[in-house]
C-alpha cells in the first residue's frame, strides 16, 4: 500500500454493503511474552534487538515499547512458545551489546483478536472491545492493531473468558448463524 491507500482502496469489494463490520474472533494459546527491562533509549537499539532475533530464526508477533524518564525503555514482544527456550540464550549473549538490565519471560499468556474490514470505518469498535474485557475484569498485557484487527494479550487463565466476552459484545455468539449467499458473486 502506498500514497495513503488502504485495504479498501486496493480491494474495493471489501467496502461493499454486504461487508460485515466484524468478521470474527480468533485466539492463540501458543504465545510467550518477553520483556527487556531498562533498555537504553537511543536510536538503533530496537533494530539491533530484532536483527539478533531474526538472525536466530525467531518469529515476532506483537511489540510494545514503553519509555521512561530515566533514559531507558522497556521493550516487550511476543513469539511462539516453541521458540521461547531459544530466545533466552540469544538475549543473554546480547545483553552487553543491547545494554538491558533484565529480561522477563511470561509463557502464561494468550492472544484474543477481533477481525473485521468494517473496523476502519466504524467508530467505537475499539471501545467496545476493551470495555468487554474490562467488564469481565480481564487485564490487558499488550495491544496490537491494524486497520482490520485488534489483538490483546491477556493472562492465559482469562483467555477463554476474553473470547466469550468479545463474542458477546459484538453479538457473535448467536445460537444459530444465518448463512448469507450473495448471488452471482461467488461468495
Image: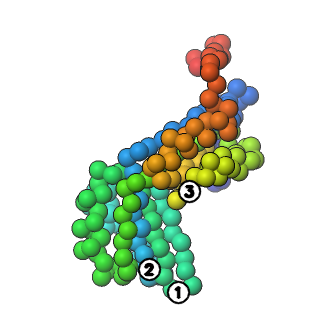
- Given residues 135 and 48, the one toward you in this image is 135
Which of the image's four quarters has the C terminus? top right
Label pair 1/3, CB-CB below 8 angstroms = no
Residue designated by label 2: 38
Residue designated by label 3: 140
The residue positioned 48% from the left and 61% from the top of the image is 63
Instruction: Work out whether residue 5 can be spotted.
Output: no
* Numbered disc in front, either 2 or 3: 3
Label pair 1/2, CB-CB below 8 angstroms = yes
Where residue 170 appears, x then y in whole percent? 67, 36
The residue positioned 53% from the left and 72% from the top of the image is 66
Q: How is the image coloured?
A: rainbow
The residue most toward the top is: 183
Q: Callout 2: helix, strand or loop? A: strand
User: How many residues crowd around disc 1 within 10 Å: few (fewer than 14), some, or many (20 or more)?
Assistant: few
Separation of disc 1 and disc 2 at Cα?
9 Å
Separation of disc 2 and disc 3 at Cα?
21 Å
Residue designated by label 1: 70
Instruction: Work out whether residue 95 can be spotted.
Output: yes
The residue positioned 29% from the left and 62% from the top of the image is 87
Amino acid at each position: 500500500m502506498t500514497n495513503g491507500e488502504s485495504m479498501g482502496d486496493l480491494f474495493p469489494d471489501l467496502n461493499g454493503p454486504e461487508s460485515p463490520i466484524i468478521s470474527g474472533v480468533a485466539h492463540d494459546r501458543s504465545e510467550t511474552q518477553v520483556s527487556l527491562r531498562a533498555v537504553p533509549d537511543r536510536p538503533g537499539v530496537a533494530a539491533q534487538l530484532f536483527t539478533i532475533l531474526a538472525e536466530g530464526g525467531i518469529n515476532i508477533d506483537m511489540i510494545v515499547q514503553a519509555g521512561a524518564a530515566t533514559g531507558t525503555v522497556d521493550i516487550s514482544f511476543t513469539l511462539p512458545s516453541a521458540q521461547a527456550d531459544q530466545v533466552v540464550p540469544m538475549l543473554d549473549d546480547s545483553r552487553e551489546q543491547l545494554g538491558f538490565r533484565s529480561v522477563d519471560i511470561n509463557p502464561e499468556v494468550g492472544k484474543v483478536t477481533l477481525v473485521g474490514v468494517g473496523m476502519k470505518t466504524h467508530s467505537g469498535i475499539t471501545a467496545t472491545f476493551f470495555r468487554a474485557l474490562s467488564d469481565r475484569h480481564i487485564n490487558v498485557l499488550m495491544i496490537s492493531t491494524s486497520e482490520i484487527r485488534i489483538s490483546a494479550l491477556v493472562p492465559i487463565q482469562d483467555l477463554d473468558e476474553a473470547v466469550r466476552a468479545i463474542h458477546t459484545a459484538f453479538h457473535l455468539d448467536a445460537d444459530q448463524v444465518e448463512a448469507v449467499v450473495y448471488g452471482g458473486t461467488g461468495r
